[in-house]
């Protein structure tokens, strides 16, 4: 089966860690499938030729030259959408199925009107995320409002969705009540599965470590994490390790919002971007992951921490309750420093609870993200979309217009794998 992906997938010549690693992992799995020929289509504003192609590790990559950021925004993305749409109209007949990865980058607009089997994997919904952006006006709010316009206009035209959680499935059903909605989890990176079988590592310096993987992103709860840590440092000798990009203006904003009077220079360590092996190691050293996101679908950091055996304290937003059952496979906190600090202390003072949550979450996550299951379910969904075949009920479900209110185990039972 010849599959064309339209995805935010940089050229394989880029050697740094991929910003959407679940796509790299799934592409690698599919490239070894005997019945799949995978081509990935993406954009590049810097390339000289209108179209560039290359083969790499069993995958064909096609890159289209598009406008740079400023021109792209000035044209309201219409020029980039048009370039992509023209290429698809001229070449889509070469493929058996077009798989759009996400709706945030106007992929549905570029694919509108194509007469071919079409599948869209939900990632996040920018039209929902923009509602949670703090402040009256910001560049993020402007950009996400524009992207949200395209989501609302073109998602109702998508006939097939691949969803992960009760939250994205509910929104897919809301956008197009007649759509066929399939279920599949994301493919996770191999080092986290290795970490699942390794003993816990002692943190450097001996202090208990709390892990936050959101860099200095406001939407991931960076400010609330720092404020909760400030509360914790009044009574407990924790160290906070922050993975991900951090920017001086965002750090300064956190210190303006909260006093943070109890933090010493060596209490918070910014590690920057980490590869999968480094993150897996951090998961084995830390006492828990803090993930107080404003809105998320199925955050990779939570899934990877669970696979590696790290307990998670998170906010119950978006699709996170499809990943965590409060008190069984993690702990939910309110989006407030006081609530976060209380839940972390609950774990810290109860080693038996930490061990039980880690063990139970890991068992669920290992089955949920099993690479062979994710691969077979992906191919099964491709066959269903391409040929109209009936498939396992574990990879599909039907949703009412109010599906966003349905409990997650109705859509994605943990026994599915």
Image (cartoon, helix red, strand yellow):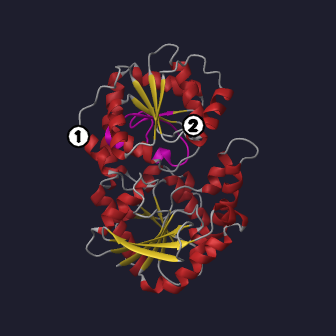
Residue 194 found in image quarter? top left
Q: Which residue lies furthest to the front in this view?
A: 48
For residue 262: magenta?
no
Q: Badge 2: few (under 14), some or many (20 or more) residues near its Cα, within 10 Å?
A: many
Please state, as top left, top right, bottom left or bottom right, where the C terminus lies in the image.
bottom left
* Residue drawn where x is 66% and y is 73% of the image: 79
Q: How crowded is mark 1: few (under 14 residues within 10 Å), some or many (20 or more)?
A: few
Q: Which mark is residue 197?
A: 1
SS class of the residue under badge 2?
Answer: loop
- Looking at the image, residue 219 lies above or below residue 262: below
In whole angstroms, how far apart are the C-alphas of marks 2 and 1? 30 Å
| In the image, farthest residue toward the top | 235
Residue drawn at (60%, 21%) of the image: 260
- Left/right placement of residue 131 relative to residue 414 reads right
Question: Residue at left 41%, top 79%?
Answer: 386
Q: Does the magenta stretch include residue 311?
A: yes
Q: Is residue 376 visible?
A: no
Magenta highlight range: 306-332
Q: Percent x, y for residue 294?
A: 59, 42
Query: Who's the residue at 66% across and 66% down the image?
Result: 150
Provide residue 146's location: percent of width, then percent of height: 69, 60
In this figure, which residue is indicated by the disc labeled 2?
Answer: 221
Q: Please name whichever residue, 7 or 306, is drawn nearer the observer in this view of the structure.
A: 7
Measured as percent of width and height from the top left, residue 51 is found at 50, 77
Q: Helix, strand, or loop for circle 1?
A: loop
Report which quarter residue 392 is drawn in.
bottom left
Mark 2–mark 1 CB contact (< 8 Å): no
The mark nearer the N terminus, 2 or 1, is 1
Compared to 350, does 160 lie above or below?
A: below
Residue 25 in picture, x, y percent from top left: 35, 58
Whether residue 113 is visible: yes
């Amino acid at each position: 089966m010849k599959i064309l992906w339209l995805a935010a997938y940089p050229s394989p010549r880029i050697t740094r860690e991929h910003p959407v690693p679940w796509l790299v992992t799934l592409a690698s799995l599919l490239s070894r499938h005997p019945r799949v020929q995978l081509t990935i289509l993406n954009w590049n504003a810097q390339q000289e030729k209108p179209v560039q192609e290359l083969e790499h590790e069993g995958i064909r990559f096609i890159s289209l030259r598009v406008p740079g950021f400023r021109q792209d925004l000035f044209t309201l993305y219409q020029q980039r959408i048009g370039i992509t749409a023209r290429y698809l109209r001229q070449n889509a007949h070469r493929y058996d199925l077009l798989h759009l990865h996400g709706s945030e980058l106007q992929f549905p607009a570029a694919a509108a009107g194509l007469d071919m089997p079409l599948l869209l994997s939900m990632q996040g919904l920018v039209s929902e995320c923009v509602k949670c952006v703090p402040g009256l006006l910001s560049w993020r709010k402007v950009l996400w409002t524009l992207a949200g316009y395209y989501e609302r206009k073109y998602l109702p035209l998508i006939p097939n969705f691949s969803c992960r959680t009760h939250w994205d499935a509910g929104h897919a059903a809301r956008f197009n009540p007649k759509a066929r909605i399939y279920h599949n989890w994301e493919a996770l990176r191999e080092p986290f599965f290795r970490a699942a079988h390794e003993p816990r590592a002692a943190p450097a310096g001996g202090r208990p470590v709390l892990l936050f993987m959101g860099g200095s992103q406001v939407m991931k709860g960076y400010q609330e994490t720092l404020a909760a840590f400030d509360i914790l440092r009044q009574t407990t000798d924790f160290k906070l390790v922050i993975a991900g990009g951090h920017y001086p203006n965002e750090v300064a904003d956190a210190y303006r919002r909260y006093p943070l009077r109890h933090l010493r220079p060596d209490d918070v360590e910014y590690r920057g971007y980490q590869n999968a092996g480094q993150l897996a190691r951090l998961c084995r050293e830390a006492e828990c992951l803090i993930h107080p996101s404003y809105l998320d679908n199925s955050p990779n950091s939570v899934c990877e921490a669970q696979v590696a055996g790290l307990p998670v304290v998170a906010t119950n937003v978006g699709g996170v309750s499809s990943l965590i059952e409060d008190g069984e496979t993690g702990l939910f906190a309110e989006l407030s420093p006081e609530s976060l600090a209380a839940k972390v202390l609950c774990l810290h003072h109860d080693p038996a609870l930490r061990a039980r949550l880690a063990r139970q979450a890991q068992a669920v996550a290992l089955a949920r993200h099993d690479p062979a299951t994710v691969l077979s379910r992906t191919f099964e969904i491709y066959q269903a979309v391409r040929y109209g075949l009936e498939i396992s009920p574990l990879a599909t479900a039907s949703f009412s217009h109010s599906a966003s209110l349905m409990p997650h185990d109705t859509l994605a039972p943990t026994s599915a794998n």
